[in-house]
């Protein structure tokens, strides 16, 4: 199940490298928060047909906590014969996570299994049918088990109360073999309400990848996102052990217009050229960032790469300066000692006490193509 969002290797010049040392190294300010206590609440109670699913971004929307997931394996075949989904979702009206979450509802077919959440284009679906479907096992002769995948990222309801939402996603080319994923690009889907499927609009008609906002040669702005005073703020974080992150912003109402995006270039500068983007911190390809009233700072939460640690950083603004990383909690170790946990994400819509009580999920592998998403309560206090 292990994965990361699509990312490109973004060149780091000497100036960018120096900024990264200031933002993330020994000169970074101390965190504005400290951890008082943590409490493991166990795995989320998904349907029995769900063997494993990762990701787990969420948002408060339409009176519910709405969750989106990436690759999802099924215990039995769905009505279409498949036992694999590249994206699924669920929602609950339970907003009190102190005793765990209940009522995680999701649409299912006649077999009791979820369908694909993010829709494939006809060409993408045809490729998957020819290479990755049960029927393809008997007829495929080339690129067998190859597939297109659509991995959902941050979910951002309209800040003006229109009732709709924007959903980041990454388009992935997956080939047979462990970790054999390559990013094609990232984009935004529009989602009218939780009872309907999202729509992937054609943002670049006539292009080779018309649905994508950012291509394979650009940073993958799907790691973390938030809305600040009407602006959509998004982070792109490279993979690897350091996962340096850059920052972009766009008016929420213009988010589907690639030309309206600007990129943080350091200091007070923003540039329309993504190549001017400056690194602001080390994070992860799946991460959450939100304002925390209790500590008076922005809080970033993410899983440390190749580790079972979940970490946090704080900053006075989305662009920083971000603090040194500090341990939030140790995740429950995977069943296989050679594996590690990942996708540590905070759920701001479940937070209580002005953000002093946080709820954080992460994926823990329990076997081959199996796993659970565990929930942890974290008590924070402002650092004195």
Image (cartoon, rainbow, N blue to C red):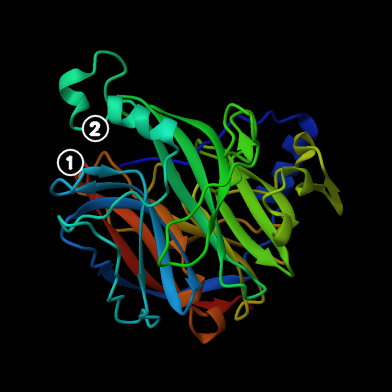
Residue 257 horizontal side relative to residue 66, left or right? right
User: In the image, what residue occupies the spot 43% across and 45% down?
Assistant: 151
**Residue 134 visible in the snapshot:** yes
Horizontally, is 241 left or right of 280 in the view?
Answer: left
Label 2, on which residue? 133
Q: Residue at x 24, y 64 (%)?
A: 46
Query: Is 35 located above or below residue 15 in the figure?
Result: below
Verify CB contact (< 8 Å) between mark 2 and mark 1: yes
Q: Which mark is residue 373?
A: none
Residue at horizontal 69%, vertical 49%? 247
Of 269 and 173, the residue lying toward us: 173
**Left or right: residue 208 compared with residue 338:** right
Pick out the residue farthest to the bottom.
Answer: 353
Screen quadrant of the N terminus:
top left
Q: Secondary structure at mark 2?
A: loop
Q: Quadrant of the C terminus?
A: bottom right
**226 or 362, nearer to the observer:** 226
Tell me which label, 2 or 1, sits earlier in the chain: 1
> Is disc 1 surrounded by few (<14), some (14 to 19) or many (20+) residues within 10 Å?
few
The crowding category of the residue bearing disc 2, from other C-alpha atoms within 10 Å (few below 14, some 14 to 19, many at least 20), is: many
The residue to which callout 1 is attached is 81
CA separation in Å, label 2 and label 1: 8 Å
């Amino acid at each position: 199940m292990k994965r990361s969002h699509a990312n490109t290797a973004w060149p780091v010049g000497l100036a960018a490298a120096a900024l990264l040392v200031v933002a993330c190294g020994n000169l970074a300010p101390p965190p504005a928060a400290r951890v008082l206590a943590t409490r493991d609440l166990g795995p989320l109670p998904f349907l029995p047909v769900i063997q494993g699913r990762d990701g787990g971004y969420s948002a408060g929307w339409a009176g519910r906590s709405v969750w989106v997931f990436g690759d999802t394996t099924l215990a039995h075949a769905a009505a279409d014969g498949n036992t694999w989904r590249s994206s699924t979702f669920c929602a609950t009206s339970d907003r009190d996570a102190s005793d765990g979450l209940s009522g995680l509802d999701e649409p299912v077919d006649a077999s009791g299994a979820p369908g694909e959440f993010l829709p494939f284009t006809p060409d993408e679906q045809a490729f998957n049918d020819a290479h990755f479907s049960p029927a393809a096992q008997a007829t495929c002769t080339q690129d067998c088990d190859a597939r297109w995948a659509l991995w959902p990222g941050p979910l951002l309801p309209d800040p003006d109360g229109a009732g709709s939402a924007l959903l980041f996603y990454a388009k992935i080319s997956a080939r047979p073999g462990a970790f054999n994923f390559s990013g094609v690009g990232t984009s935004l889907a529009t989602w009218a309400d939780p009872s309907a499927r999202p729509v992937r609009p054609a943002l670049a008609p006539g292009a080779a990848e018309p649905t994508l906002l950012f291509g394979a040669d650009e940073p993958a702005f799907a790691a973390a996102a938030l809305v600040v005073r009407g602006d959509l703020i998004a982070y792109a974080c490279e993979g690897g052990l350091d996962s340096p992150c850059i920052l972009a912003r766009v008016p929420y109402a213009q988010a589907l217009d690639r030309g309206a995006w600007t990129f943080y270039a350091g200091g007070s500068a923003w540039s329309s050229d993504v190549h001017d983007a400056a690194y602001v911190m080390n994070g992860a390809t799946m991460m959450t960032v939100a304002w925390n009233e209790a500590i008076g700072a922005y809080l970033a939460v993410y899983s440390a790469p190749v580790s079972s640690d979940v970490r946090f950083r704080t900053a006075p603004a989305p662009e920083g300066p971000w603090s040194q990383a500090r341990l939030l909690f140790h995740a429950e170790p995977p069943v296989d000692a050679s594996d590690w946990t990942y996708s540590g994400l905070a759920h701001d819509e479940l937070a209580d006490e002005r953000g002093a009580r946080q709820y954080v999920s992460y994926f823990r592998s329990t076997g081959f193509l199996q796993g659970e998403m565990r929930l942890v309560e974290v008590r924070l206090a402002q650092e004195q």
